[in-house]
Image (cartoon, grey):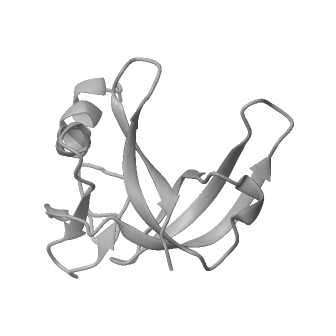
Amino acid sequence: MCFDPNIIRSATEPFWAGAAEGRLMLQRCCDTGTVFYYPRATSPFTGGPTEWLEASGKGEIYSCSVSTRTLPGYCLAYVRLEEGPLLLTNVEADDLQSIAIGQRVAVAFRPDASGRAVPVFRLQEK
């Protein structure tokens, strides 16, 4: 079987279009109603159809690792979104050492090296 990269592009296009508009887009399985991430052509639960929804953009740090060995430092984290899925992402903070598991975060979008908007998360005020 040959790999068709157009399948992936069409499956993820709504995610990237939403990101360009500052919206975090997720998919939901039409058969089970379960929200999932990362974008794909069919439901990972049933292989059936999916629908897109705009996520709240809010979540909680599930796991994180802060590195200060490079400048600038960074935090790589799994964020559990309010809708349920875990998303591997970066968490931004003025003080990286203040980042901890269980903290509330909200999505922001930053350009990657190509200029495409990608989701990152910032600590929410208490």
* The quarter of the displayed image where residue 30 is located: bottom left
The structure residue drawn at horizontal position 77% and vertical position 29%, both measured from the top left corner, is 71
Viewer-closest of 84 and 96: 96
Establish if 20 lies above or below 31: above
Labels in figure, total: 0
In this image, 113 relative to 90: left or right?
A: left
Viewer-closest of 88 and 121: 121
The structure residue drawn at horizontal position 58% and vertical position 71%, both measured from the top left corner, is 61
**Where residue 46 sits in the image (x, y, percent)?**
27, 71
**Where residue 97 sits in the image (x, y, percent)?**
77, 59
Establish if 29 lies above or below 76: below
Viewer-closest of 98 and 45: 98
In this image, 45 relative to 92: left or right?
A: left
Quadrant holding the N terminus: top left
* The quarter of the displayed image where residue 115 is located: top left
**Where residue 98 sits in the image (x, y, percent)?**
72, 65
Q: Residue furthest right?
A: 69
The structure residue drawn at horizontal position 19% and vertical position 65%, both measured from the top left corner, is 48
Viewer-closest of 1 and 33: 33
**Where residue 13 sits in the image (x, y, percent)?**
20, 37
